[in-house]
Image (cartoon, rainbow, N blue to C red):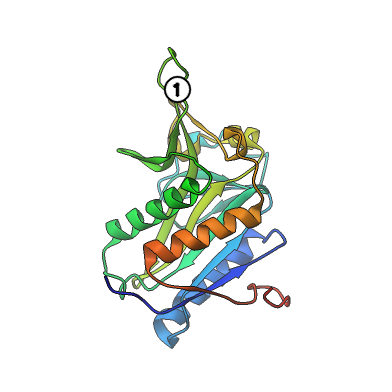
Amino acid sequence: MKNFPPVEWAISEAPVPYEAALAFMEARARAIREENAPELVWFLEHPPLYTAGTSARIEDLRDPARFPVFDAGRGGQYTYHGPGQRVAYVMLDVGARGRDVRAFVAQLEDWIIRALAAFNVDSGVRDGRVGVWVDRTEPGGPPREDKIAAIGVRLRRWVSFHGISLNVEPELEHFTGITPCGIADPRYGVTSLAGLGRIVSMEEVDIALKAGFEQVFRSKLVRVGAPLSESPAA
């Protein structure tokens, strides 16, 4: 299988305001297409907020005054971002990587599944339900599944931005202000690594995500300084 050039990889240590992150992603995606800028994967956390995708329904915003709400411009519906959740924004040249949107989304899913496997979490995708899910059915109980990671991307001239969010140890109660991804069925909820009894650091999650990305996307990640920050790379 073909290997691709290295991809820059940045980690922001402090929470990043959503509007600043969105402006940066749009500019970087444009630079990748027009100026041959390097591809970038950006790991970060946001302060508590809700984002609305292009399919968001206003009735799914249950508590609009709770946290700031942003129009993300990505695919999908409402989602929550906040501390304890690892967001990974991917600015990749999908045109050069096969020009196949469905295959790209499948790669994002596989990336998350591989990272979770590093913590002995068995996860997968489900027909008709976007994201990555885990089975929470109790012995003898009714079927139940929880989402542990969300996916929402946008492509502009075949360059991606937005990406994935993996629940490490966020405040899960914050998800009650929305109908996550428009799914109100009580059989389907939201969980995290901590909720599954895996108490791991964000650094450990980053290591697992780095390894999974390099396997799935066949590019080495090369650490660079964080966007919107003067701090040098570690």
Residue 45 picture quarter: bottom right
Q: Nearer the viewer, residue 96 or 222?
A: 222
Q: Residue at x 33, y 60 (%)?
A: 104
Q: Position of residue 120 (x, y in %)?
A: 50, 41
Location of the C terminus (image quadrant): bottom right
Q: Nearer the viewer, residue 198 or 21?
A: 198
Q: Give the side of residue 43 with respect to residue 103, left or right.
A: right
Residue 101 picture quarter: bottom left
Q: Residue furthest bottom?
A: 35
Q: Residue at x 44, y 87 (%)?
A: 35
Q: Give the side of residue 95 with respect to residue 56, left or right.
A: left
Residue 182 in sight from this viewpoint: yes
Q: Please, what is the three-letter code of the amino acid marked with disc 1?
A: Thr
Residue 187 to residue 122: above or below: above
Which residue was labeled with disc 1? 137
SS assignment at label 1: loop
Q: Position of residue 74 (x, y in %)?
A: 44, 56
Q: Residue at x 43, y 25 (%)?
A: 185
Q: Position of residue 58 (x, y in %)?
A: 49, 39
Q: Residue at x 28, y 56 (%)?
A: 102
Q: Position of residue 127 (x, y in %)?
A: 30, 38
Graded by Cα atoms within 10 Å as few (under 14), some (14 to 19) or many (20 or more), the crowding at tag 1 reads: few
Residue 45 in sight from this viewpoint: no
